[in-house]
Image (spheres, grey):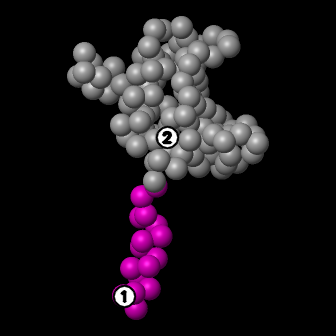
Amino acid sequence: MSAFIFSFGAKIWRPVDFHLIKITVLNACGVDDLAKNTTIFLRRKGFDVIYFGNAAEHLEKTAIVDKLSPEMKWGKIVGKELGVANITTSIDSTRCINVVVLLGGDYDQTLTKKIFNRRLFGF
């Protein structure tokens, strides 16, 4: 009986391997180094950020787009770590990324303040 409970509990409380989540971070508000600093924060948490740069258009609201999971499984995990609740899905199984983070004009009210902690980046 205890083996059954243990195996069931391990399935429920098994931590997610953040390094399995492939992320692109795009700066959609024009603030210098925002995508780079967010990338550093996510990488230190263990996520696999494969690209960061500027978005083609300006956005007012920060958003996370889950590219592989209709239930937004990956986007919710990243959103929780960043403090972002605006999560959508746009399935594209041809890409090798799970999540796109779009940093909008509301980044200073939306993102976790740990990203802006200068000691985190060694300044």
Q: Nearer the viewer, residue 37 or 82?
A: 37
Q: Are marks 2 and 1 in contact (CB under 8 Å)?
A: no
Residue under the point 46% across and 55% down: 16
Dominant secondary-structure state across the stretch colored magenta? helix
Residue kind at label 1, given as amino acid type: Ser
Report whether 41 appears left or right of 86: left
Residue 11 visible in image: yes
- Give how far across and how far down residue 60 sits, in percent: 59, 13
Residue 107: percent from left, percent from top: 47, 18
The quadrant the N terminus occupies is: bottom left
Q: Which quarter of the figure has residue 66?
A: top right
**Residue 5 in magenta stretch:** yes
Residue 77: percent from left, percent from top: 50, 45
Looking at the picture, does residue 59 appear above or below residue 13? Answer: above
Mark 1 lies on residue: 2
Pointer 2 residue: 48
> Of marks 2 and 1, which one's residue comes earlier in the chain?
1
How many neighbours does mark 1 have within 10 angstroms: few (below 14), some (14-19), or many (20 or more)? few
